Amino acid sequence: MTAYRDAPHNDPKQGIHVENFDFWYGEFHALTGVTLDLAQNKITSFIGPSGCGKSTFLRCINRMNDLIDGTRTAGTMQLDGNEIYAEGVDPVDLRRRVGMIFQQPNPFPKSIYENVAFGPRLQGVTAKSDLDAIVEESLKRANLWKEVSNQLNKNGLALSGGQQQRLCIARVLAVQPDVLLMDEPCSAIDPTSVQKVEDLMYELAPEMTIIIVTHNMQQAARVSDYMAFFLQEHAGEPATLIEYGVTGEIFSAPQDQRTEDYITGRFG
Amino acid sequence: MPEPIMTPPPTIVEDINRAPDTGRVPDDLVKPPHIQDITPNSRKSYKRGLKLVDRKTYVKERALEALFLACAFVAVLAVFLIFVFTIYRAAPVLTEIGFAEFFGLDWAPSEGSYGIVALLLGSLLVTAGSLALGVPLAIGCAVYLVEIASKRVSSIVSTAVDLLAGVPSVIFGFFGLVMLRPIIADLTGGMGFGALTAWLVLAIMIVPTITTLTMDALRSIPMGVREASYSMGATKWQTIYKVVLPAAKLGIVNAVVLGMGRAIGETMAVLMVVGNAPVVPESISSPVSTLTSQIALDMGYSSGLHRAALFGMGVVLFVISASLVGIVRFFSRERGERVDSREAERERERRERLTKATPVELATEGPDLSATQIAQAAEVQENSRKRIKRHLQNGTSAKVSKDVTNATMITIFKVAGWLATGVLALIIAFVAWNGLPVMSLDFIFGWPEGVNAEGGIFPTIVSSLYVTALAMLICAPIAVLAAVYLAEYAKQGRRVAFIRYAADTLSSVPSIVMGLFGFALFVEAFGFGLSMLSAALALALMMLPIVMRTTEEAIRAVPRYIRWGAYGLGATKWQVVSRVVLPTAFPRIATGIVLAIGRAVGETAVVLYTMGQAINLPVTPLDSGRPMTIHLYLLANDGINMQAAYGTALLLMLMILAFNLFARYLSHKSAGKAGGK
Amino acid sequence: MAGRVKRLLALGCALALALGLAACGGSETATLTVAGSTTVLPIAEIAAEDFEEESGVHVLVSGLGSSAGIEAVINGTADVATSSRDLTPDEAKEGLSQYAVAHDGIAVIVNDANPVEDISLDDLQAIYDGKIENWSEVGGEDLAIQVVNRDEASGTREAFRTIVMRGTPFDRTAAVLPGTGQVRDVVARTPGAIGYISIGFVENRFTTATVKTLDVDGVEPTEANLESGAYPLSRDLYFFTKGPAQGEALAFIDYVRSSAMDATIRDAGYVPVGEEAAEPAEGSGGAEDAQASTAGGGGDA
């Protein structure tokens, strides 16, 4: 059973609402019985040891797992009152509203400009002036503009790891998603860049629901308003949500013994 | 740095285990300083100080490096020899025939006319048509298999395509002659010999080649790039068209050029279906001839000026294929988008320094933002968000909905995938259906008898295996050591670029030209005669760049940190290479060698005029023999005992299949050993 | 793990060994190399087998085409050349000895559906040099003639050129096929096609498709007409050696010309020359002598 303390409750027509959600990779039952509402325009962190299903769950939110053969879901997952996994729902459109940042910065092997303009172009924006404006605005939002403004035609891969990650963020900002999923966005970049990415999350949070998967407990404590702890207790059994609530409270007084064990470093 | 052309390009997008930009290990990492920088001038050792480099170790390391370099230069030497020797034998073209007449339209050796233009046009016509048919099909098929098909379908079909990439050209020619030609004849009302039939046969032939290489290129694009595109709300087709294909562009161009090289250099399959009329054809269904097929047809009996003219045609083919390599090298160097240069690395470092935050900045930019700051940020965000959204609204939806486009394109790819698979399956079925009734122990272990080679084909099997084994004994050690040099020792620079260019050129030499060269050098000049040895040497040169390439790739795929581990324990360079790198890369190297063996077994044009055609059980390397490919070719050409031809084709295909399956087994086994994934 | 590298080195040693073997190779039992005409190949191969059984001499036979075989004997690569044509003037200067082994006729074949029954040598020439392009010009239907020629290595082509073309060049747009069976197959399937093959291959137990032979200048291509010399498209099949045949080569040639081979030669569709064939003529003496000698043999048969 999941322990909830001061966990947010959404208006059912708003934000992400998950109820009794299960997920399978082929025969492998990866997640079971996840129920939670994600706080709107707040930062929520998912924590837990490796293999606890937190990344899997994150990728369920924008149906990235569809790209893997043989995956299956059960239960309810709604965005603004609409069932994400309902028949006929276009995952492509869903992903325009639920953007994602990955662990490994993954700019396209194209110029910085083309990287950022990619999403708007997909949405049919063709006018150079519009694209220019979006690119500039997005890069500024991602705090990258100063560093790259004079070399927008440079290949995105020529940037440093931290810059690449901010480029990826700028790329997502260019389509203005409502929800931003971040899958360990800082694990492959240097500390200075981590700092910048965290600042960015702060700045974006008032307008965007941000969900971050992280292994770094300090980071989770620093950046997130809410925290969800996932755990796979026994090998071979599905993982589930153990505890969900306000970050500070989970850290100071976890309700579940397993959460406490994890936070105090007894396993994971 | 110029990139190797014929080698599939290193991953454009970074891979965790490699240097982010260059895709190769920087030299300072693979050259331990104690070998490079200190001369062994003193052997004093200090009780507690650092020991200096031991002279023995130093000499050994240097000697090994020299040996590897020598091996790497074999490719250069071979290209040089082929060029010079073929030109030398073609000299009478200039001195006696004259340049103008050689590039005339009339090819009639019996009447003393040696103009090759009609043949050249024939080659170009046949190649162009086959590319037009084969390239879209192959790329479509590759995209389907990598991007669209389910894992299960993809693994089955791509295995089939892989295996079919190894089907020897003589079998394709046989299929074209017996299956396609009568159909074309009925459709066009002619005899069915001509460019059209050759287009179909060659297109079918180059599809597996281009497909597998394109698949490699597509697979080298990290999943993350696709995920990024999908997560932006791109459809599958948009992702393929806007992200994956552009990212794989260089690899695909390489695949197409390799396919083109294969088409223009293809001899046996073309020879069997073009009708061999050395004229500018009246239509695409009337007989035509090409440079390669004419060489194969005439070489056996030509003499004097006629033979010189054939060598002249060999030079022309060589120049064409070498310039194809050169053009694409140039083309890929010109492209500024590649990010594997050192310049990019330096630039990156510079930026990193520039953008490094000072401690003060760090302190002020910490997460403890004041309430006002957050409020300000929110406001800025608000504005920014609005601005972006406003511009986004200017987007217009396309005339055709993205879903329709997506569905249409996906269907097209699917059709391409299944069409390619279907055609290839048809060939297998054709050979198997006709060949199975002939199969028996007597056929495999018997000796050919009588007027029409009834009975078995045992000596041809032995000849095939003999020459292949000999060729690989010659080729494999040289190729592996050369690859070690290129991957581990060589500094990026002119020398390596030169060796790569030579290897690429060597791999592009049409097999009939290699046959001509082998005949001129090994059979005649070295006096090895028509023998296993002559054929094996020519085959070895043919296989050298292939094994070199796969080995180099295998070595490069060994992650950097594994090398670091060994250096960190105090291993010398050779120790690192021999105990860590090569064993780690071994399964992939072995896979490459086994695949090369499969290819050597199926090679026809190279051995046609280097081994002789006598039915004989070879004992010494100087014995002559007739490999299965030639046996099949002769039977098919005679067109009398087709039963034996089918049987030989089936056995040949089974044999190559066995080698390829073995190669797969090797690579799977190694993957399993590494603990999967 | 290092064992694998050692194995690589072992491969290298094996290579050295192989090259060593190559260097000292060459000591073998008596071997006779026979190369040349694909037309003669069947006879030569059967003869080789039987001869090997009888004498223990190993005979290697390859069918590269008559010219290639003669070239091989001139440069010493082969001991005996098999040929379905005479020597060219150039080749005649090389001092080869000529031995006729069989008579052969060249049948002009057309599709079964073709109503034409007879053709003159002149019309045949005109068809093959491209002047006549439609069957209606030689008394047939209004149908384009599709000419099938043999490759230049073929002795059949050479004989056809000598007898039919008489100095006129072949039409180069004709399809050139490198095998008798292929010519037969293409003609059998193509209504307007014309080709020529050795009489021995007109009827063939390996194929079901049939072709029709044309009478040439009113003479049917039968064995009787061939032997009588009435059928114009006839030639002899020869063996050549460099200088007079000696030792194993002579023994082999004698065997082929012996009555032991008569049945085989008839099986293959040719007419044997008979044992009592005249002594070989010196190639240097010119092709005429050889012609005379074999003509005599043919008369006796």
Image: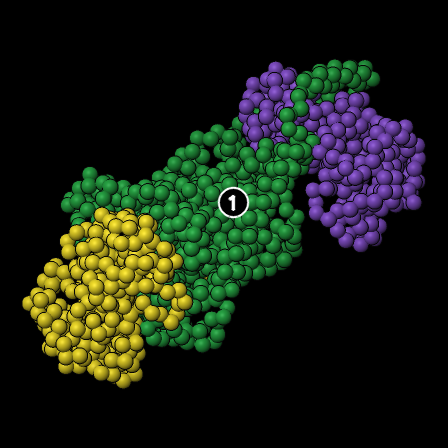
**Where's the N terminus of chain C, which quadrant?**
bottom right
- In the image, the chain rendered in purple is A
**Which residue is drawn at the image coordinates 27% and 66% (left, top)?**
C198
Q: Residue at x 45, y 38 (%)?
A: B3
How many numbered dots are placed on residues in this image? Answer: 1
The answer to which of A168 and B104 lies nearer the viewer is B104
- Report if residue B591 is visible in the image: no
**Identity of the residue furthest to the left in this view:** C285
Q: Colour of chain B?
A: green
Name the spot of residue B226 as percent of width and height, x first.
64, 37
The chain holding disc 1 is B
Question: Residue B653's spot in the image, x, y percent?
Answer: 48, 62
Q: Which chain is yellow?
A: C
Residue at horizontal 11 percent and vertical 77 percent from the top: C278
Res. B140 in view: yes
Is disc 1 placed on a helix, strand or loop?
helix
> Quick one: label 1, few (<14), some, or many (20+) residues within 10 Å?
many
Rendered view: A197 above or below B179: above
Residue at the extreme bottom of the image, as rendered:
C54
Apparent side of residue A186 relative to residue B485 in the rendered image (left or right): right
In front of the other: C121 or A234: C121
**Residue positioned 54% across, 56% down in the render:** B425
Question: On the picture, is B96 further left or further right than A266?
Answer: left
Q: To which quarter of the image does residue A229 belong? A: top right
Position above or below: B177 against C28: above
Instruction: Give, as a three-letter code, the residue at label 1.
Output: Ala
The residue singled out by tag 1 in the image is B138
Spot occupied by residue B619 in the image (x, y as percentages of width and height): 34, 72
The foreground one among B412 and C288 is C288
